[in-house]
Amino acid sequence: MNAVIEIRGLAKAFGSFQALAGVDLDVRPGEVLCIIGASGSGKTTLLRCINQLVEFDAGSIVLDGALVGYRRAGDVLHPLSEREIARQRLRTGMVFQRFNLFPHLTALENVIEGPVQVLRRPKAEAIAEARALLKRVGLADKEGAYPASLSGGQQQRVAIARALAMKPQVILFDEPTSALDPELVGEVLAVMKDLARSGVTMIVVTHELAFAREVADRVVFMDKGAIVESGTPAKVLGSPREPRTQAFLSAVLGGHRTG
Amino acid sequence: MSLRIVHKRHWGRWLAAAVIVVLLILLAIAFAHGQIDWKVVGQFFTAPAILSGLVNTVVMAVLAMALGIVLGVVVAVMRLSPNQVLQSVAIGYAWLFRGTPTILQLLLWFNLGLVFPTLGIPGVWSVKTIDVMTPFLAALLGLGINQGAYTSEVVRAGLMSVDAGQTEAAQSIGMTRLLALRRIILPQAMRVVIPPLGNEFIGMVKLTSLASVIQYAEVLHSAEDIYYVNNKVIELLIVAGLWYLVVVSLLTPLQMLLERRFARGVATSR
């Protein structure tokens, strides 16, 4: 099947720090891809390049057949306008580590904001769909609540509903459970598992190896801005070939190899 | 056996209150015997000339503040824009108008005709500057543009107080910078901006009195016109002063209403 995302030679430096040093990656429709690696390995930068919150220095990303951020004329790439970039971002949804819900809007208002303001959908339709989405993430009774009155796990589930409401082709998760209290991680992962089973294409940057093992179709291990190893969870997490992957896993798992 | 608790006696408070009361009484007696004709104060408090001056004061304060807020928001956004040209223009604007006295700016606007005798498009259409630059327009431009320079800094502080993640979240659902600003960033910045803006508005109510020097008929100007005739200087200054106090007192509850409106989502706690 054709890839929904094709990344070739992607590079990005922040000053003298090389965050991405030539990444090649294909993501198939319906695939759940988990990216693991130490902090500073370039995982988050990779996600942020895909939805253009970060401008990359070299390489290319093709999203659903369209070049991301540029228009090609012969051998020359012309940068897209801000409006065109905003339109491209509609193909990707993003779930942030720190939720980033809009604090002045209720849970329901957060979810309908994009459909109504950006997609210009009729408000009644958007509300009906938002209610269904809040129900899907288990928050049907919280539609009138402001983010400040919700727990971290509830906020993150509203954020997932907000991303789903835009009907993106791919949802990018940037360490979605890292800012949560341990007892709240499970409820967010449960929603993500449900999405994965329903065929949503997902790229998940995560430290939750158990989640990756259970849900991912493919696990990618990154180090120093490059992909070191990639394969099924059983291969990458269970019997990694690369010494760097082995070192990372034994550090994370405290020396106990499981799986 | 039950023990009785005797409350602490605050002798210092009683003493301070007694001293203040005595001083207030002495002050009241002094003013009662002073050269103030209180009957004149009462008589002119609701005089038509004073009331029309009051209306002009309020109208000018509201319009100049509105102009100041519009300019302030635009300039604050320019200042935070990645476009260096817009940034420089914003910095230059704040420098120029905060760096010169307001009364001087009012006089410059009022006397604009000395620099540009006519305004318009040469050969197509033009008007005499002195016909256009009425005391009202000169005061509005002078006060509003000056206010914009101060308001831009207040708004900038508000915009910077909103987490950068908010812009990213707005962009992630396909919003352009402008839409994100209008729907997501500004409403959150308002919460921070309103208290200092209330302060600025109170300042503006009093600043309109400067417009009396360019013949704008606000309340102080009306009071002056009256005391030039009847010589009751202090009485009419008290009339004007009381009206300023009334207007400013009405602004405080208005500010509280606005603050509550923009505190949505913040005040609610778990």
Image (cartoon, coloured by chain):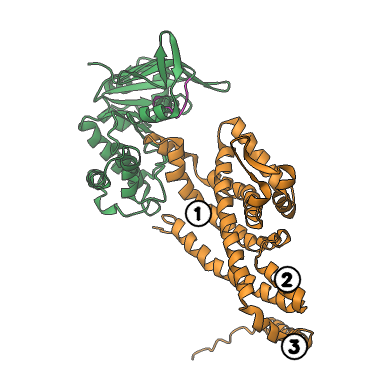
Chain colours: A green, B orange
Disc 2, SS: helix
Query: Counting other residues with Cα less than 10 Å from the Cα at mark 3, is it few (<14), some (14-19), or many (20 or more)?
Result: few
Residue B208 x, y percent position in the rendering: 66, 61
Q: Chain of mark 3?
A: B
Dot 2 and dot 3 within a common chain: yes
Same chain assignment for discs 1 and 3: yes
Q: Are marks 2 and 1 on the same chain?
A: yes
Determine which residue is flagged by label 1: B191
Q: Seen in the image, is A216 located left or right of residue B161?
A: left
Sequence-earlier tag: 2 or 1: 1
Q: Position of residue B9 (x, y in %)?
A: 64, 85
Q: Amino acid at mark 1?
A: Arg
In the image, taking residue B15 as reference, residue A161 lies left or right, namely: left
* Front-most of residues A206 and B165: B165
Q: Residue A50 appears at what percent x and percent y?
A: 39, 25
State left or right for residue A238 relative to residue A79: left
Q: Which residues are magenta?
A: A50-56
Q: In this rendering, which labeled residue sits more in front, label 1 or label 3?
A: 3
For the residue labelled by badge 3, is the local secondary structure a helix, a strand or a loop? helix
Q: Read off the residue under disc 3.
A: B32
> Which subunit holds the residue at mark 1?
B
Visible residue check, residue A246: no
Which numbered dot is residue B224?
A: 2
Query: What's the distance in space between the residues labelled 2 and 3, CA to CA?
Result: 23 Å
